[in-house]
Amino acid sequence: MAKVNKKIINQNMVDYQKEKNFAIQILLGKKSLAEFEYIVDYVSTIKLESKKMNPDGLVLFVGSGPIPLSAMLLADEGFNVDCLDFSNEAVLIGREIIKKFGYQKRIQIIAGDARLFNNYSVYDTIVLALEAGVNYHTKKEILEKIFTSMKPDGLVLVRSSNEKNSEGSYVNSSSYLENFFHVEQTIQTFSGYCSTKVCKMPVPHKADLI
Ligand SMILES: C[S@@+](CC[C@H](N)C(=O)[O-])C[C@H]1O[C@@H](n2cnc3c(N)ncnc32)[C@H](O)[C@@H]1O
């Protein structure tokens, strides 16, 4: 059985509750998006991440949450984004947020578990939220599923924790990412709290093709 890391589970729950409570405040008209604690970090992160993406490509954001902020900022950069989340509550609240800010034409939210999702091959870029996959085992399952079914020339952006700054509160996928992907670049994101690994399918050696 997979080892349970309580610290990571708790941090995920705290982050999720915070985001959910803020989403409800927005929907009630009591808070604005500009007041969201992490808005500045999100804006600068998306500016960096979006530069790596095919500007005409379709994007999948995995783990969009009650405030699909990454997806909304990507839509502001001109992308069409599908979001995936396995929490029905996050999907319902997220859809209301999308509606409130008028993003229905550019963003749709799909309910589903990233470990079982069968449509990765449609997307040019897949972005994995820091909290998508609550332990090493599920994170690995998601990455494996993406790897075996994505477009061969697709791009995967994996947000991963920076151990030094986040003190083991999130799954650090860096160590086993390279089992699957060729990590082309690591971008420091979320003020150094996170890094985004820019991943591609490894190019096969000529000898393997013969
Ligand atoms: C708190 S949100 C953070 C994302 C943030 N709102 C953004 O725009 O970047 C992380 C979400 O990941 C979702 N999640 C975690 N594991 C998942 C999985 N296996 N499949 C789909 N969604 C998942 C959780 O339900 C949660 O809503």
Image (tube, rainbow, N blue to C red):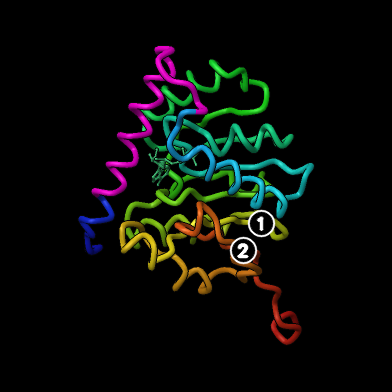
* Residue situated in front as seen by the camera: 78 or 199: 78
Q: Is residue 67 magenta?
A: no
Residue placed at 42% from the left, 49% from the top? Answer: 132
Label 1 is placed on what type of residue?
Leu
In the image, residue 158 above or below residue 175: above
Q: Is residue 176 left or right of residue 157?
A: left
Label 2 is placed on what type of residue?
Cys
Q: List the residue tagged with mark 1.
A: 155
Residue 184 drawn at (x, y percent): 66, 69
Secondary structure under badge 2? Answer: strand
Mark 2 and mark 1 lie on one chain; the one further toward the N terminus is: 1
In the image, residue 108 above or below residue 197: above
Chief SS of the magenta region: helix
Q: Is residue 206 left or right of residue 45?
A: right
* Residue situated in front as seen by the camera: 3 or 8: 8
Picture quadrant of ligand 1: top left
Residue 12 drawn at (x, y percent): 31, 46
In the rendered view of the protein, which quadrant contains the N terminus?
A: bottom left
Dot 2 alpha-carbon crowd within 10 angstroms: few under 14, some 14 to 19, many 20 or more: many
Residue placed at 40% from the left, 58% from the top? Answer: 139
In the image, residue 138 above or below residue 75: below
* Residue situated in front as seen by the camera: 132 or 203: 132
Report the magenta residues as a range. Answer: 10-34
Disc ID at residue 130: none
Callout 1: CB less than 8 Å from ligand 1: no
Tag 2 near tag 1, CB within 8 Å: yes
Q: List the residue tagged with mark 2.
A: 199
* Residue situated in front as seen by the camera: 47 or 57: 47
Residue placed at 76% from the left, 83% from the top? Answer: 206
